Each structure stands twice: as structure tokens, then as C-alpha cells.
Amino acid sequence: MSAKSKTTPLRNKLEKLESLMAWFESDDLDVEEALEKFKEADALAKEIEEQLQALENQVTVLKERFDLPS
Amino acid sequence: MENLPLSVSDCIAYINQTLEYAYPSVRVVGEVSSFKINQGKYAFFDIKDEQGSLNCFMMAYQLRQPLEDGMKVEVIAQPKITPWGKFSLTVRAVQPVGEGSLKRAFELLVKKLQKEGLFAAERKRSLPVMPERIGVISSTDAAGYKDFIRILGDRWGGMEVEVAHVQVQGALAPEQIIRALDHFNEQAEPPEVVVVIRGGGSVDDLAAFNDEPLARAIASSRVPTLIGIGHEVDTTLACMVADVRAATPSNAAQLLVPDRQEIIARQRREMSRAVGLVVRAYARQRALAGEARLRILAIIWQRLAHLRRDHHATQRTLLELDPKRVLSRGYALLRGADGAIIRGEDNVQPGRDITIETNNSIIEAGVTYVRKK
């Protein structure tokens, strides 16, 4: 496994938010519960947004030469 | 030397010596005929024009693409006389020339690889949705490469991108790309995807991607392959064997990673929708006492406030829900003696005391008469 996965926590958050959003689609929402879930979803969405904006790629051009037989 | 007679073999040897000295290598263009491969190893054919014909011989493995009678080719060969007195060209390299021949050679190769099942849909692997390590094979000078990296960075981040700089056109390109593919496949921790990138250009420049050994190397890559080499008309062998093919380098970036701005926008839309659903649920629940209703309304109002900047639709909802706004339009809130809001269906008896809240005052009143609308 690579040293540190940068996006697994992000993936988990996205999945969690997705399941929260799905909950809102169900019939007969209990308003109190809905507000709690909304609060949770709101915070999660904010975190995800910040994390997404901050992501940056690390581009390395290999030093190896491929024009010579190895 | 003229006095002593030569043996037949010596004669042939001397003549071959002269030929080797005078014509170590000739380039000949002509049409292929009587092409055959013996014992799977030895290739024989004639190369001819309207007036002459020369016999050619080469090892079958040296053929970089299949040949067929009627194809126009260029051979690089050495002339010699065989031990049986046959004048023959020993071919070092052969390639089709002219559009017709190139096209035919390509068709033959496609058939061959298709028969081997290298294009089969079942072989194709899908790419990881959010890759964290990718390998890129491209010329770092090319515009296509720069576009790919830029769009990749706009859309997504957090990836380790290793780039193998190679030539992507010309006769040397196929071998270099193969070496780069091998490099990534042989890493202790190989990337999740290898992306082969090349910017736009004329059709001939794509010849490297119709190279058979390269196509085979891509087909047998353990690491899934994505190819984006920007051709306009015909596809290439490399595109046919790769796991995923993109129309252009930019398209390759789109296929490889999600777009974070799009995710953010979609999230915000979904949050707005959730708000709407909560409000709807609230509207349905009439069992709540009046105070509880107002409290919930206020909480929803607060929650929506931070979304206000982003969506006009949400803004409208906010405005509609704002109790102050409703009251300023002339509506009033009626409450009973217990403070609970009186809704139309509630049983209101004449003689009861009620309070009326308008946008700027509270009125104490008593019910005199109730008439259903």
C-alpha cells in the first residue's frame, strides 16, 4: 500500500453524504431527525468542499531515459 | 586468377565478395508477389516492377507487419548469389510504402490481432474512479501533454503522477513507448493506470501507434491503459487494444478523474433540495404545537442563511419562509390563550380570547363569530 492515501477519507465522506442525501428522499420524514441529519450533511458537505479545493497533484518527470535499450 | 579454373563454390564466393563490397546495402521499391512463409520461419517473396523481378528472402520474425501480394514495399537488402546460383536479396528491413500498401498492411494487422482476441470487449478493464498514482507516457514537449496535466490538475488533485518522457512519433517511438510501459509494469508498486498521451497531428505521425509490438505491449500490460492520442479520422491499433481510449489528451483527463467543481456544484444543489424536503416534511406535520413550529421554522431559516449566497432558488425559499416577510404582506398570526397558533381547522369558539400578531403589533381580541369560507 502506498504511504498515505489522500483520498480514501474523502471517498468515505462522499459516500456518507450520498447516503444522507438518500435519506432525505424517503417519505414521512421526521422533522426533528431531518434537522439533525441536515446539520450533519451540511458540515460534511463543507468539509468535502474544502478538501476538494485543496487537493493538488504531484507531477514528477522520471529521470530514466527510454531512448536507450535497458 | 584467370588461369586457374575456380570451383563452383569459389566462383560464387568471389562474386558474393564483390557484391558485398560494391553493394553492401540497396534500397529497392517494388511490388510483392509470391509471398510465402516456410516452416513458420523463412519468408520468401519476389519484388517486382513492370519489367523486372528480384527474389527476396528474410527471417519471418523480422517482419514488423504482415505482407501480401500486390503490396508496394521498400526493402533494405544485401544482394547475393545463393549456393544454388540463385540471385537473391537478403532483406534486413521491409516496410509498405504508398497509401494503398500502408492501408492494406494495417488491415491485415487488424485482422490478425482481432483473430487473437486482443480487441475483445471482455478484456477491457475499467479505470479506478479516483486514482492516486498514475503513470504518464508522453513527450513532455508536446502540447497534448501540457493540456492533459493542466486539465488533470484543474479537475482533481492528491495524485502522484510519474511521467516517462519518450518520442511519440517517428521510427524510434514504438520501442521507447514499449520501454516506458515495461518500466511502469515492473515497478514494485505499479501505478493504477498508465496514460499514453500525444497531441494532434497529421495521420502519418500516428504510424508509431500502429506498430505491432507496441500494440501487443499495450494489450499485455498488467497496469490498465488509457490512451489519448488525438486522431481525427481513423483509429490506431494502440487505441483498439488499450483498456480505455480517449478522443484527445484533454478527454483523457476527463475520463480519468472526476471534476471537483462539478461535485461541489452538485452537492450544493442536493443540499438545497434537502432543505426543500425538510420544509415539506415540516409543512406536513400539523401535530406540532405552534411554538414548536415556529422554533423549527427559525432553525430552518438559520440553516438556509448560509446557502443564501449560492442559489437564487434558495433565496426565494428563504424569503418566502421568513416569518417577518409573511407578516409584512398583511398576514397575521393568530394564537389562542395557551399561545398555540390557531390554524384554520382548529376549533375556534366565539367568546374565546385570542392574540393577533401582525408585522408590527400584538392585538388582544375576542372571538365574536366564526363563519366557514
Image (cartoon, grey):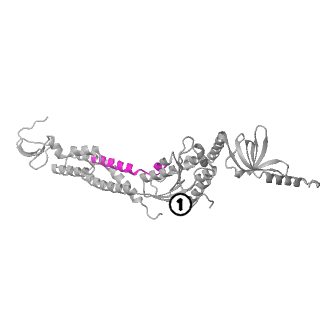
Residue that numbered label 1 is attached to: A62
Residue at x 62% of width, y 49% of height:
B211
- The answer to whether residue A28 is visible is no
Q: Is residue B32 above or below residue A33?
A: above
User: Where, quadrant-wise, is the N terminus of chain B in this rendering?
Assistant: bottom right
Q: Is residue B325 above or below residue A60?
A: above
Q: In the displayed structure, would residue B49 be above or below residue B152?
A: above
Find residue B102 and report its horizontal and vertical position in percent. 65, 42
**B258 is within the stretch colored magenta:** yes
Q: Amino acid at mark 1?
A: Leu
Where is residue B254 shown, x and y percent of the image? 46, 48
Q: Is residue B142 magenta?
A: no
Closer to us: B191 or B85: B85
Question: Residue placed farthest to the bottom in the image?
Answer: A3
Q: Is residue B23 left or right of residue B278?
A: right
- Using residue B337 as the reference point, say whether residue A28 is left or right of it: right
Magenta stretch, residue numbers: B252-275
- B325, B332: nearer the viewer: B325
Quarter of image, res B21: bottom right
How crowded pointer 1 is (Cα within 10 Å; few <14, some 14-19, many 20+) is rated as some
The secondary structure that dominates the magenta segment is helix
In front here: B218 or B199? Answer: B199
